[in-house]
Image: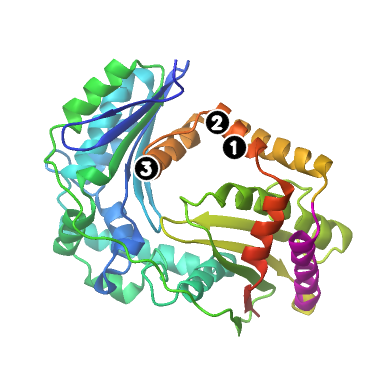
Amino acid sequence: MKEFETYTLPNGIKGIHRRVKSSISHCALVINAGTRDELKSEYGLAHFTEHAIFKGTTHRKAYQVNCRLENLGGELNAYTTKEDTTIHATTLKTDFSKAAELIADVAFNSTFPEHELAKEREVIVDEINTYKDSPADMIFDTFEDMIFAGSELGHNILGTKAALMRHDGDAIRRFIERTHTTDQMVFSTIGNLSLKAVQSVAERYFGQQKQTCRSFKRSTPQGVAPFEKQITKHTHQAHCIVGARAYDIHADKRLPLALLINILGGPSANSRLNILLREKNGLSYNIEANYTPYNDCGMVAMYFSSDHNNVDACRELIAKELKSLRTTRLSSRRMAMTKRQFLAQMAISMENNEGYMLGAGKSYLVHDEIDTLEEVYRKVSAVTAEQIIEVADEIFSNTSTLIYQ
């Protein structure tokens, strides 16, 4: 039996399902619309829309939306990224159809009453204030704003308070009509249900929606020159990002880069930067590296926080490590360990069915297919030490730096 089974509804919404032995079911509507699809007058609108869809539909008031699954012991939630909006639910298997119906209701039948939107604006203002109190979060958005300068990717997800106050129900409806089209949606599910049962539910609640198609294309961000910038924040610690533009989500070199970033600053305590900055030198408690691929570009970012007096020492050690990865071939033993660690991390993450379901929905939306675990193993095993050096040299030859002091 295939790991995932797929189908397409008459209106273009695609479905992907994985059957597992569990009393719990997970489902999500993944929509290929995020903050990079906002017009300049709409900054923050994708995130506001995500909040607003829960504030009442043609069938339910806001409290009825919130209580529908919670009264059954389940949960309903959503999130917004630069490129997608996801509405997801977790319930007992016996309540799967109720979860699917509720997701469809908020996705297609929300009414956006102004009295509810007014309250939600205040909630998001509080979210913005909380975000501003967290330099470790803010610095990533500032860095993206600079490295994708002049593009739709170069603004944060929450938007500004001033812009938020301008957004009303009509603005949300226009945004949804333009971006939440059925040809850009995937209904992703995992649970102990047959494909026939899942598809029947999907056809009942999603298949009846009007077919719509996207009429615009995203513009690829232009390149920017490497930069080094310091911003005074008067924080107790200094925060720093060293990063660069990287490969998009379709690139063949995406996998070698993912391996490289995992070696450099992945979640394991034996990542090279963690050992170098924290274990050997005691310079930083927080050190990590991330690779974020987008549809037509990407970004790598190495982040650390430290005492203000230790920033230069940390940067020197990072620069030395990047040079080593660009010039020194990893041994066969080290490559084998790296691949085994990466694959084990992936396999363990797949034990989280909700996370697996969300990732599969996004992957199917972007690639129109899902690699089996065996295919992923094969691709990872084929990565060579020479590819790691090549990727490291391409990505790390011209890095940019942002410091909050």
Q: Point out residue 83 in the picture as x, y percentages from the top left corner.
A: 37, 55
Q: Residue 97 in the image: x percent, y percent? A: 27, 24
Residue under numbered circle 3: 77
- The quadrant of the picture occupied by the C terminus is bottom right
Residue kind at label 3, given as amino acid type: Asn
Q: Earlier in the sequence, mark 3 or mark 1?
A: 3
Which x, y percent locates residue 180?
A: 23, 50
Frontmost of labels 3 and 1 is: 1
Q: Nearer the viewer, residue 76 or 312?
A: 312
Q: CA distance from mark 3 to mark 1?
A: 34 Å
Which residue does the image show at 23% across and 55% down from the upper left?
179
Q: Which residues are magenta?
A: 311-329
Q: Residues within 10 Å of mark 3 (few under 14, many from 20)?
A: some
Q: Residue at x 60, y 56 (%)?
A: 290
* Residue on which disc 2 sits: 375
Q: Is residue 41 magenta?
A: no
**What amino acid is labelled 1 in the image?**
Lys
In the image, 325 versus 119, the foreground residue is 325
Tell me the quarter of the picture where residue 115 sits: bottom left
For discs 2 and 3, the disc positioned in front in the rendered view = 2
Q: Main secondary structure of the magenta part?
A: helix
Numbered label attached to residue 379: 1
Secondary structure type for disc 1: helix
Per the model, the C-alpha gap separating discs 1 and 2 is 6 Å
Marks 2 & 3, CB-CB < 8 Å contact: no
CB-based contact (under 8 Å), mark 3 and mark 1: no
Q: Mark 2 or 3 closer to N-term?
A: 3
